Image: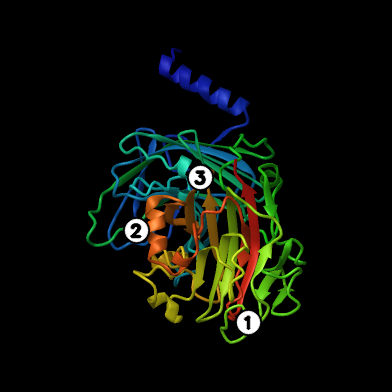
Amino acid sequence: MKFSTTFLLALALSSSVMAQGWKTLFDGKTLNGWNQVTGSAKFEVENGTIVGTTVHNSPNSFLLSDRVYGDFVLELEVMIEDTNSNSGIQFRSQHDAAANNGVGKVFGYQYELDPSVRMWTAGIYDEGRRDWLYPLSLNPAGQHPLKTGVYNKVRIECKGIETRTWINDIPGAHMFDAVDVKGYIALQVHSISKSQPAGKRIWWRNIRIKEGDFKFTDFPEDIYVVNTGINQLSDFEKKAGWKLLFDGATTKGWKGAYKPAFPEKGWEVKDGELRVIPSGGAESANGGDIVTLDQYSAFDLSFEFKLEKAANSGVKYFVTLTENNQGSAIGLEYQLLDDTLHPDAKMGLNGNRTLASLYDLIKANKQPRFVRQPGNWNSGRVVVYPDNRVVHYLNGVKVLEYVRGSQSFRDLVAISKYKIWEKFGEAPKGHILLQDHGDAVAFRNIKIRELK
């Protein structure tokens, strides 16, 4: 019996893959091992690939693995037709067949496939549950276009509560999250609106998985890590230089602004949260602002905050405490505000006093879908680079950027409330400040990494 060279080569490659502990999830001929759920998009096999085709009047459609997976390395190749398409790969996801009146629901972690100019491919979305966990704007170096019309290499590594992703061998997202440690793998055909043309196609091939214990592929330490644990750092973060500014139990590392010690009233530590006790909205009239004992120059600061309705507060940086002013201490401020109910949102210029803005200077450019309303936790992040470039993020999405000390920055200061302070915001270093503006606000997961 004679065998073709192609067959022998394929057999050799298959044997090599199995010898390395890999298991093929797609046989190249059938959809054995997969089940379509929820939507009515078409999945079929053509020329050794799985092809998904969009249809109208259908929710998101998923081709679901026939079993769940825990710790694994998953690799596959995917091709998308054009930049108007969108898709994803579910991993460690869940399926509730009875949900949505029997239509079913797939929910859980999704590796994003995004060929648009946003370039969030390899980001992590929580399908049907918490929305975005790791928008790729958190890792600008990983924002590369998903190439259309050709195959792109996807890699996902999951072990314990840790996940790392790559696209075309470029590091993407790095996350620690304990909600799901096992679940299904699924291929998604996204729903489309009536205005979008049906018949757009997505191709998947060379789908393979390696289960069990393994050593993570090296990941750059300077890439931001999303850690949803409360007031804790992973070993990876510690090695990368991250430090907690709030341990969840004490006020260690903090003192009152213009005070020798932590305020005796106005603040409390409870349930792993550092809270301002409301006092009628008066600025620094109760416990007053608190500041870190240490000062920082270039840094990556992140924090979570929860506001009550109509609340006002702020996180300030480059606070020098040299002004000896009345009220809140002076510094660059990441504004915390209920934009809907607090009147300050309509004051200032062009919205520069709204949530996540550089208070009274630069408006945060944010979409409503990325704002969680009062009573819910939001995440803020301020990155100050050694070259004085500063970036604000809200819930993982970049909302503004500026350069301290630049002419454009000084021009904004000149028409702001800060114009009376010489070289406002240009100090070489300063404290981090949490503001007491008399409204209830809670903080947690406050961490910082100094940059060099």
Q: Which residue is mark 3?
A: 33
Q: Amino acid at mark 1?
A: Ala
Q: Position of residue 120 (x, y in %)?
A: 42, 48
Residue in front for this viewpoint, 410 or 222: 410
Mark in the foreground, 2 or 1: 1
Q: Gap in Å between the C-alphas at discs 3 and 2?
A: 23 Å
Q: Amino acid at mark 2?
A: Ser
Which residue in the rendered view is the most extreme toward the bottom?
280
Residue in front for this viewpoint, 39 or 316: 316
Left or right, 109 with reference to 266? left
Residue at image coords 54%, 57%: 381
Q: Which residue is mark 2?
A: 191
* Residue 10 visible in rendering: yes
Q: Position of residue 260 (x, y in %)?
A: 75, 68
Q: Position of residue 429 (x, y in %)?
A: 60, 52
Q: Which residue is mark 1?
A: 285
In the depicted structure, whether residue 301 falls above or below residue 305: above
Instruction: Say which element carries label 1.
Output: loop
Q: Position of residue 176 (x, y in %)?
A: 63, 52
Q: Gap in Å between the C-alphas at discs 3 and 1?
A: 65 Å
Q: Which quadrant holds residue 115? A: top left
Residue in front for this viewpoint, 305 or 348: 348
Q: Gap in Å between the C-alphas at discs 2 and 1?
A: 52 Å
Work out which quarter of the rendered image holds the C terminus and state it. top right
* Residue 366 visible in rendering: no
